[in-house]
Image (cartoon, helix red, strand yellow):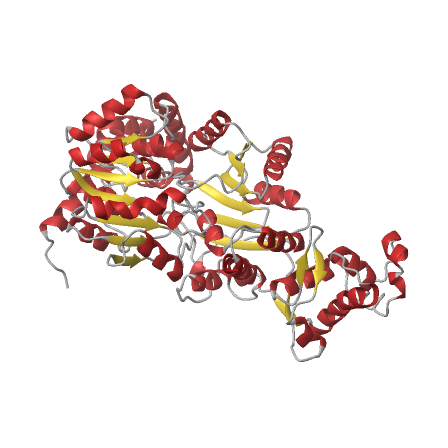
Amino acid sequence: MTFPLSPADDAALDVLRRVFGYDAFRGPQQEIVDHLIGGGDALVLMPTGGGKSLCYQIPALVRPGAGVVISPLIALMQDQVDALTAVGVRAGFLNSTQGLDARRRVEADFLAGELDLLYLAPEALGNGYTQQLLDRGKISLFAIDEAHCVAQWGHDFRPDYLALSMLYERWPEVPRIALTATATSATRAEIATRLGLTGARQFVASFDRPNIQYRIEAKREPRKQLLELLRTEHPGDAGIVYCLSRASVDKTADFLVANGVAALPYHAGLDGATRARHQQRFLREDGLVMVATIAFGMGIDKPDVRFVAHLDLPKSVEGYYQETGRAGRDGLPSTAWLAYGLQDVVQQRKMIDRSDGDRAHRRSLAAHLDAMLALCETVDCRRVQLLNYFGQASGPCGNCDTCLTPPQSWDGTVAAQKLLSTVLRLHREHNQKFGAGHSIDILRGRRTDKVAQYGHDALSVFGIGADLGEAEWRGVVRQLLAQGLLAVEGDYGSLVLTEASTEVLRRERAVPMRREPERRAASTRTAKGKPAAVELPPEAEPVFERLRAWRAASAKEQGVPAYVIFHDATLRQIATEAPTTLEELSRISGVGENKLAKYGEQLLGALAC
């Protein structure tokens, strides 16, 4: 059954087709757009690459006045404005990077009603001058992007977001939309409360990104493991590698460059000019790898990031999901890869113990880490575990490592008892505490200098664990820490028992463990076993490469990222369908009126070569 479109529906669909070049809305976009055009407030959860920006851009173009977008991404505002300008939208921004003349031009355009969208940093709204400027103009809506930044103990907290509840107090008649890609139900409630959106309608899209293949493997030599991934699966691809420390970022970037991979570092220890230059190169050049701390990535709209790799354990599932979601925004097959080891768990536990905040805050951090550890240690589908964390039920995906190569579980109770007994005896008989390495040496019967020095070869547990190798014992320690059956304390990561340890030692609790499967080549198949994207026919491959070369030259000439001109997905469709007229070209997804007028003849010329 079909229903007649309302005038708002007609206007929104016209903007979608004419300006952005898409024939239909995706998922809940239509409902959100209609709600906002009608003056309603909204809280939107939609995965990265799901089309969140259209949910406020289209209403801003339909409603009278300028849409004011609050974004923490000062360094990316120019690119966001360039992307909108490329499709014919009148957009501008005000932030601390501008000179006085540039600010005055944008302010004048806003007051004259000549802007469709105005981007502001959250701290700007605390400025009386900015508030008075907005009072003098016509505002169609407020869009609060990256709304999870308001969650005070979240993975990306921004203090300035706490003041955004004033939007309703000062401009109660202007509709507001808050958007984020990552939030549990608890975080969603916190966002609604802190932004004064408790009465807003909530829209929660599916969190699933079926084109992303999630893989987590045990750390051996993580940089070499990363290099193997890049050489075998992603040669020449753009990607992001996350490291926990600045030193690790620098060393990893140097390692990749030394091994022939074009890589750049990004972290807060670099000066602002260097960070800006590296970010611009990553956005504008093909095939660069950015090695970064989590300071990098929010708002990066590069659609062809083919992989996101983590060399250190993320602190939370929210952070992990946010970061991995930067891969495959174009819907093409992409990889989320994580190397995870014992030291990650030890380090994260120590960081929690030393963190600021009260006991409740530390408990919250520990709960976040426990959920991340559960994702790493699961023997079930990674995607099921990930989506379940956000309250979404699903079945096995067929496109994660545990689906493609199911791991085995084994009864680790006896091994757990041996390790816990070693920790207990070191403390009870010697009043000493040691890290995992020393305890493993004792269990394996290795008379190291340290073991001999302390007389630990006389312990009754010495040598009782010779049946397992060192890597296996490290896996046992890691999983006991993950299950809360062991803890670490002090600067050196000494192992200590927990209350739950007693249940294992008394044989009152079984300890199932995960055994790492044999490694095998990755698959590019998605959920339900279907290819993630239709491969280009052989005859279209050279055409696609020719179009990419044309796009790269055009982007360089204009000083904008290549994706501002056209996404890969659009070029792939053009290469496959080979349109010969502007009329045929206008039917390609992503080719709106402005881009057709600007690039149509050039594209047809490139196709005719």
Judged left or right of residue 96, residue 401 is right
Number of dots carrying numbers: 0
**Quadrant location of the C terminus in the rendered image:** top left
Nearer-the-camera pick, 347 or 413? 347
Q: Residue at x 27, y 28 (%)?
A: 599
Nearer-the-camera pick, 254 or 92? 92
- Expressed as whole percent of the image width and height from the top left, the position of residue 492 reads 72, 51
**Quadrant location of the N terminus in the rendered image:** bottom left
Q: Quadrant of residue 84?
A: top left
21, above or below 347, in the image: above
Q: Residue at x 26, y 46 (%)?
A: 166
Q: Residue at x 45, y 30 (%)?
A: 285
Q: Residue at x 37, y 24 (%)?
A: 559
458, above or below 313, in the image: below
Q: Residue furthest top?
A: 101
Judged left or right of residue 225, residue 201 is left
Q: Quadrant of residue 440?
A: bottom right
Q: Is residue 295 visible?
A: yes
Q: Quadrant of residue 188?
A: bottom left
Q: Is residue 23 visible?
A: no
66, above or below 32, in the image: above
- Expressed as whole percent of the image width and height from the top left, the position of residue 101 reads 28, 19
Judged left or right of residue 295, residue 575 is left
- Expressed as whole percent of the image width and height from the top left, the position of residue 489 reads 67, 57
- Expressed as whole percent of the image width and height from the top left, the position of residue 560 reads 36, 27
143, above or below 390, in the image: above
Judged left or right of residue 227, residue 544 is left
